[in-house]
Amino acid sequence: MTAAFDSVAPRRHVLTVGLEDYFQVGSFQQLIQARQWHRFETRLERNTLQALKLLDEHGVKATFFVLGWIAHNYPDIVREVASRGHEIASKGYYHRSIRQMSPAEFRDDLRRAREALERASGKQVVGYRVAHEWFTPQDLWALDVLAQEEYLYDSSIGPLFRRFAHEPYRRFLHTHTSGQRRLWEFPLSSVSLLGWHIPIAGGNYFRQFPHTVLRRVVHHWHEHNDAPFVMYFHVWELDRDQPNITATPLLTRIRHYRNLGKMSWVLAHYLSKYRFTGVADYLGVPQVEVVPSHGPASATLVAAAIAPREQADRVPVTVVVPCYNEEVVLPYLSRTLDSLAAAMAGRYVLRFVFVDDGSADETWQMLNDLFAARGDCTLVHHPRNQGAGAAILTGLRRADTEIVCSIDCDCTYDPLELPQMIPLLGENDLVTGSPYHQQGGVRNVSAFRLLLSRGASFLYRGVLPVKLATYTSFFRVYRRSAVVDLPLRERGFLGVAEMIGLLVLRGGRVVEYPTVLQVRILGRSKLPKVRTIAGHLALLGRLAWLRISRRGSGRLMALCLLLHAGVLAVSRALPASS
């Protein structure tokens, strides 16, 4: 029976490839937004060349479904794929589901993506596949829009489980009619099992399902179905060494990372056994060369054409970045800060102070590799770990500008919001980012961290005369002269809260800026959660006592005693290893 599976058949099947980077996939959509894509290490060229090599080895031409964003930002990669004889088709401009767009938005997305793809490839684009989530029966209106936009085929229908049970023909190659136009549909291949349709077309299913089972199912399709088997994979699935997005939930991690090393040999098995081709070639549609119109200049070119202000007319600003065991994050940070500098170049002159707070990994070496040669960067090294508060204070003292900003190394707050925060400094002494402000927000942050941070802010409001929604944010703009001499006793995470407390107790002015806090995407959090609870209680008690000593208050005295009791209770319950 094994020998039967090794026979090579003359009939043709369809191979499609998703050309996208590892951080653009639908699995990470709740964590990573399109505006953050440029911050990640791209492995697109490496993975695309690996896919092209695999196809060349087996003499196979395929259809590459490509995001318009990729065509705009990496046209050379798209051009290379097209020059090797593979078809370029559309996956929309951004990695979005059809359910994230109205019909008008979908039409605009189709046009924008096609223009970018044809500009990059020099070939006419006639095919489409939705980037995220397969079409359901409620999404079939999109086929009419595709036909009206003169696409020849679509490959977005996923007849999963019992989704199209009332229209069984949609499991196979068929046509969709819209007025006088006809659209070919190449659905995701599936197998029928007890009335349920189980996907077998490739991608995640190839990695999760046992190969011994799948190869028999594919062979059964080849022997018993006249319709072509529609197989697909993504170029990032050939990259077992891709960066680890640590914030992903367990099921998402399994879906994205499990068996990445399996994909190359599984694909080689099918490519050597069966005859595959691209969609347009299967339909007999030639690849037509086009000369796309140049259209309006891109935002980047327009921005480049605007001469920046003279150096003397711009306001000097220092950005302090505390770093502790952040070697994984630093390349991401570097790209983010490049974008920040470009966004602020018209009004501000940025200088950066990076404080390596006694890291035990390669953070210091990577800081030197990335930033030491730059004239706008200062690197400071703490021989031993002193804590985030101490690192920020070191950066403040090394800064030579009156306006100083502090950001998280992992960019859990978006540094690109600093241009909106800095003008708020005005006559104030500190502007703090506030996710708990009524106009702020949080994204994918753990319930325990929210409880800890919100609870701390609630208690600080009871102790301090300035009522803020958030006291614990690292994301701030400081008037250096107002804070550089604060007698901080807390050197770690508590130092950022102590800084506000001491500042307002001596009459300083603090204002909030509503922002969004999101979960850390790369690396691991350094927050010692349990000990931080005891630390906040102790700090609150000390701040309350300072306020009492300046202005007698029976209520504050009672709160101070209560906090002292809380510290003792937490300390006794605290494990020695916490």
Image (cartoon, rainbow, N blue to C red):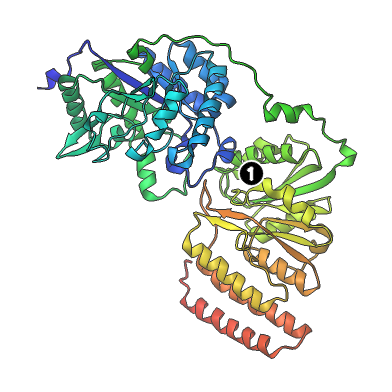
> Which residue sits furthest front?
179
> Which residue sits furthest right?
312
User: What residue lies at 75% left-to-right and 88% top-to-bottom?
Assistant: 552
In what quadrant of the picture does the N terminus appear? top left
Which of these two is toward me, 324 or 91? 91
Q: From the viewer's perspective, tell me whether residue 253 is left or right of residue 428.
A: left
Q: Amino acid type of disc 1?
A: Trp
Which residue position holds label 1? 364
Q: From the viewer's perspective, tell me whether residue 133 is left or right of residue 542.
A: left
| Image location of residue 394, percent across then percent down | 74, 56
Q: From the viewer's perspective, tell me whether residue 266 is left or right of residue 515.
A: left
Q: Is residue 44 above or below residue 294?
A: below
> Which residue sits furthest bottom?
554
User: What residue lies at 45% left-to-right and 11% top-to-bottom?
Assistant: 84
| Image location of residue 284, percent across then percent down | 35, 10
Badge 1: how crowded within 10 Å, few (<14), some, or many (20+)? many
Q: Is residue 560 above or below residue 416?
A: below
Q: Is residue 47 above or below residue 326?
A: above
Which of these two is toward me, 493 or 406? 406
Which of these two is toward me, 556 or 94? 94
Which of these two is toward me, 135 or 328? 135
